[in-house]
Amino acid sequence: MLNRIARLAIAAPRRVLAIAALIMVAAAIFGIPVAKTLSAGGFQDPTSESAQASALLTEKFDQGDMQLLITVTSDDGVHSPAATAAGTDIADRLAHSPHVAQVASAWTVPPPASTELISTDQKSGLIVAGITGGENDAQKYAKALSDELVHDRPGLTIRSGGTAMVYAQINAQTEKDLLRMEAIAIPLSFLVLVWVFGGLVAAAVPMAVGGMAILGSMSVLRLITFSTDVSIFALNLSIAMGLALAIDYTLLIISRYRDELADGVPRERALIRTMATAGRTVVFSATTVALSMVAMLLFPMYFLKSFAYAGVATVGFAALAAVVVTPAAIWLLGDRMDALNVRRLFRKADPAPKPVEQQFWYRWTHRV
């Protein structure tokens, strides 16, 4: 199989890369919006009594355990005219929202129940709103209501919280963290690859394979969301794992190919031997990683199952892109693989190839 892939890469490298590029574009269009369909929940066992009770509340009363909590704080006291007017107004507007099942507040429920919704210093009052819908819908409704109602007023401090808002904020923070991670990890990874390979072109190949792995796994995750819930944290794993595996697999293939050329093997034979050895290692490694991730499907919480979805999809696309795209890129680029060599900028020659027995890792392995 790997021999056929190598010969296909040699016979039609442009066609292979063109098809890969089209698939990548389609995966980007379909997969990038996946963040909007993922959930911040999934920590409960759906067969547990608490989860069943929450499901029953949602089914019978359109209200689960997702709540929006709003506090109104005034230095003049919770029963000051300003605090009373604001608290009553917010509670009334929540009660008229189609996404709120019921509302209780320090200003609208009779004592002694109202005293339980007032802080011990008598300066803060609490509004409790039960949000309708499941985990995904409730957090969206809660965020919209919070954006509309929660803002400071003269002499008042108004804040929101609760389970629904926590989930909404987790989703928002995760998206920010992903952007930050990409902004840091991708440039640093590229610099390390430039240092390893010496050339910008050779360093770009693993990054391209990593992009394919990430976009492919995003598409799979979005496809899965059509039939079941998927955790937002699966996206973190997908990006980190996709970049790491793609670099690892591609680095292995390119390094082996260069070793074959250094031994005087012709290009065509070198690529075929590379895929028969390094390519087989990539497939074996990917299979091992995928099988280890599949074990997480045994857990009942979809938070953990999501890691299995992301892990298997990511390693599958990383391995597929590595063994299909990398040999085609190697053959098409040829000697241009070493173009834009940064070592020449520093007038530093490329390191001369050494026999395996003289290399550091060979000696280190024997010592271990």
Image: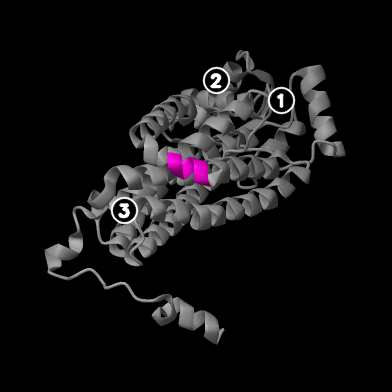
Magenta residues: mostly which secondary structure? Answer: helix
Where residue 137 sits in the image (x, y, percent)? 62, 24
The Cα atoms of the two marked residues, 2 and 1, are separated by 14 Å
Which residue is located at x 39 percent, y 58 percent? Answer: 257
Q: Mark 3 points at which residue?
A: 203
| Residue pictured at 28% horizontal, 45% vertical | 333
Label 1 belongs to which residue?
Answer: 109
Kindly check if marks 1 and 3 are in contact, taking CB atoms under 8 A apart as contact.
Answer: no
Q: Which of marks 2 and 3 is nearer the N terminus?
A: 2
Q: Alpha carbon of mark 1 to alpha carbon of mark 3: how far?
A: 66 Å
Q: Nearer the viewer, residue 113 or 144?
A: 144
Which range of residues does the magenta coloring cover? 3-7
Q: Can residue 347 be seen in this view?
A: yes
Amino acid carrying label 2: it is: Asp
* Residue 104, image x, y percentages: 69, 26
First in residue order: circle 1 vs circle 3: 1
Q: Distance between the residues labelled 2 and 3?
A: 60 Å
Q: Which mark is residue 339?
A: none
Residue extending farthest right: 49
Q: How is the image coloured?
A: one colour
Question: Given the image, on which type of amino acid does mark 3 rest?
Answer: Ala
- The image quarter in which residue 11 lies: top left
Q: How crowded is mark 2: few (under 14 residues within 10 Å), some or many (20 or more)?
A: some
Left or right: 210 in relation to 230: left
Q: 16 and 216: which one is in front?
A: 16
Whether 276 is among the magenta residues is: no
Helix, strand or loop under label 3: helix
Q: Name the residue under label 2.
A: 89
205 versus 142 height, above or below: below
Quadrant of the rendering where the C terminus is positioned: bottom right
